[in-house]
Amino acid sequence: MRMRSCGTREVDSMAEKKEATLVDRSQVKKAVQALQAFLKSKSSTESLFLDETQPISLLFTLWKIPKETQNIRIPLPHGQRPDTEEVCLFTRDEPKMTAEQTQRFYKKLLEERGVKNISEIIPYKSLKTEYKPYEAKRRLLGNFDMFLSDQRVRRLLPSHLGKHFYERKKTPLCVNLQSKHLARDIQRIIQGTSLTVTNKGCCCMARVAHSGMTADEVTENVEAAVQTVVAKLRMKGPIMKVIHLKSQTSVALPIYTSDLSHLSVLDSTNSKEASGKKKGKKNKAEDEKQEETKTELKKTKNKEGEEEEDIPQLVPIETPSKKPKVEKPSRKKQMQKAPRPAMKNVSKVQSKPAKKTGKMEQKARRKGLKGK
């Protein structure tokens, strides 16, 4: 058993090492160049605005559906958002200040810390009052490309923003406005990306670059994103099945496809899980049997001790909870069992021999008369 476990651990470690260096740089660069050529040809023929850039994202396909949801932040070496994008920040309401005063307060704070990427600040009070109607929320969603929020107000936002922010994947990202390195943190969040892994499927997507970047910058971002995702995913055994590179309008180009050697590792992990479940059931049954035997031994010991010592025991008197019902004899039974009076029987007994004696006398008289 130890040899098998050591072998499976070695296989898992080898799979993790392979996945740490999953993508081949030359293969990634070829896919990036093909994708950029396709986007340039399409923009020259169809697009009216030549300055617009399209996002390039990675599509991860996992071997298993994860048990828990996970949000992974991915820092990138090259900024994947252009400088023209507008960013909105939601802040908390400062005590003893109006909405305009809090807005000015946070603008000064960001200027002092050297933050220049945020285009507008909206306090929580103004979000509740000014952006309450449905049309105002849709306008807010369309005006900005990215949303940030103070971590002290993050849990209060979903009820006021609505489902459209989450459907279009513009959920506000948390920022600690009290940190000493605020400019660096905001720059990492804006220029980095995030991957949300859910337990509803085995596919997930993360934005990595845009079409205005060079091929080398895109490949470096892809390599960094793959390494961080493999390192931070909470899963055992082989993780990645296929990785694709794509844009909004292009076909998904494969960058990495796993070998069939991973199937043996997956079978071993699945068998381990099944055996672990069976062992758990067996252990429960064994524990129950041990408890039963312990209770039986205790009972036998108690009985032996009682026999040796001959300790008298008090037997509790059983008190009936309800009084026993007294059955009343019915009228029919009374009529059947009731004895007849003695006088009537005596008179009948006396009357019967009297009658007989009278008859005998009459017969004797008749015989006498005949004889005469």
Image (cartoon, rainbow, N blue to C red):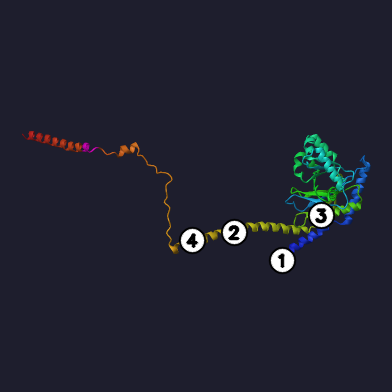
Q: Which residue is mark 3?
A: 228
Determine contact: label 1, label 3, CB under 8 Å.
no
Which label's residue is closer to the chain start, 4 or 1? 1
Numbered disc in front, either 4 or 2: 4
First in sequence: mark 3 vs mark 2:
3
CA gap, disc 4 to disc 1? 48 Å
Quarter that holds the C terminus: top left
Type of the residue with mark 4: Asn
In the rendered image, the quadrant that contains the N terminus is bottom right
Q: State the CA–CA distance, disc 2 to disc 1.
A: 28 Å
Real-space Cα separation, disc 4 to disc 3, in angstroms: 64 Å
Task: Count residues near mark 2 (Cα–Cα under 10 Å), then give few for <14, some for 14-19, many for 20+.
Answer: few
Magenta stretch contains residue 361: no
Location of residue 163 by image quarter: top right
Q: Say which label, 2 or 1, has the lower sequence index.
A: 1
Residue extending farthest left: 372
Callout 4: helix, strand or loop?
A: helix
CA separation in Å, label 1 and label 3 = 32 Å
Residue 215: tell me if it is visible. yes
Q: What range is drawn magenta here?
A: 341-345
- Mark 4 = which residue? 302
What's the amino acid at mark 1? Met
Residue 207 in picture, x, y percent from top left: 84, 48
Classify mark 4: residues with Cα within 10 Å, few (<14), some (14-19) or many (20+): few
The numbered disc on residue 287 is 2
Could you tell me the amino acid type at mark 3? Thr
Q: Identify the residue at image location x=91%, y=53%.
A: 216
Q: Which residue position is annotated with label 1? A: 3
Percent of width and height locating residue 281: 63, 56
Q: Is residue 271 left or right of residue 82?
A: left
